[in-house]
Image (cartoon, rainbow, N blue to C red):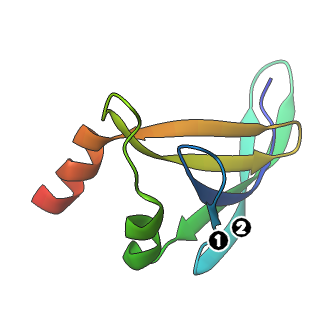
Amino acid sequence: MASSVHRVVLSDTNRTETVQPLENTNSSVQNNSAFRSVDYSSAEAIFSMDDVDRIRSKDKNGEFFFFVVVVGDNQNKFFKIKSKFFKELGEN
């Protein structure tokens, strides 16, 4: 069951600190099928790398840096950003 996305924030691995985006842009996405047509809202966020560095922390195994939190209609989704993905940002 999909839901609309209202905003995106970042959180440390302990979920004690939240970083708000510098900019949050909302738009609409339409999903059409033979059974139904649904409109969803989407969100795109831009974060300060200084804020990302501040909340970035490794868990006890050193595998995760932080969470991307997608705030939606029905619930919030937490996506773990692994250290290997974060390191790839610097390589591009």
| Front position in the image: 41 or 88 | 88
Q: Position of residue 40 (x, y in %)?
A: 79, 47
Q: Quadrant of residue 84?
A: top left
- From the viewer's perspective, is residue 45 above or below residue 84? below
* Residue at the outermost front position: 60
- From the viewer's perspective, is residue 39 above or below residue 50? above
Residue at the disc numbered 1: 20
Residue 26 visible in image? yes
- The 10 Å Cα crowd at callout 2, few under 14, some 14 to 19, many 20 or more, is few
- From the viewer's perspective, is residue 34 above or below residue 38? above
Q: Quadrant of residue 7?
A: bottom right
Which residue shows up at 67% across the image and 48% down it?
70
Indicate the secondary structure of the residue bearing disc 2.
strand
Residue at the disc numbered 2: 26
Q: Count the marks.
A: 2
Nearest-to-viewer mark from 1 and 2: 1
Say which quadrant the N terminus sits in: top right
Which amino acid, mark 2?
A: Asn
* Residue at the outermost left position: 91
Indicate the secondary structure of the residue bearing disc 1.
loop
| Front position in the image: 85 or 18 | 18
Residue 92 visible in image? no
| Front position in the image: 28 or 11 | 11
- From the viewer's perspective, is residue 6 above or below residue 3? below
Task: Name the N-terminal-most of marks 1 and 2.
Answer: 1
Q: Position of residue 48 (x, y in %)?
A: 45, 77
Q: Is residue 66 left or right of residue 69?
A: left
Q: Is residue 29 left or right of residue 79?
A: right
| Disc 1 from disc 2: Cα separation | 15 Å
Q: Is residue 84 left or right of residue 56?
A: left
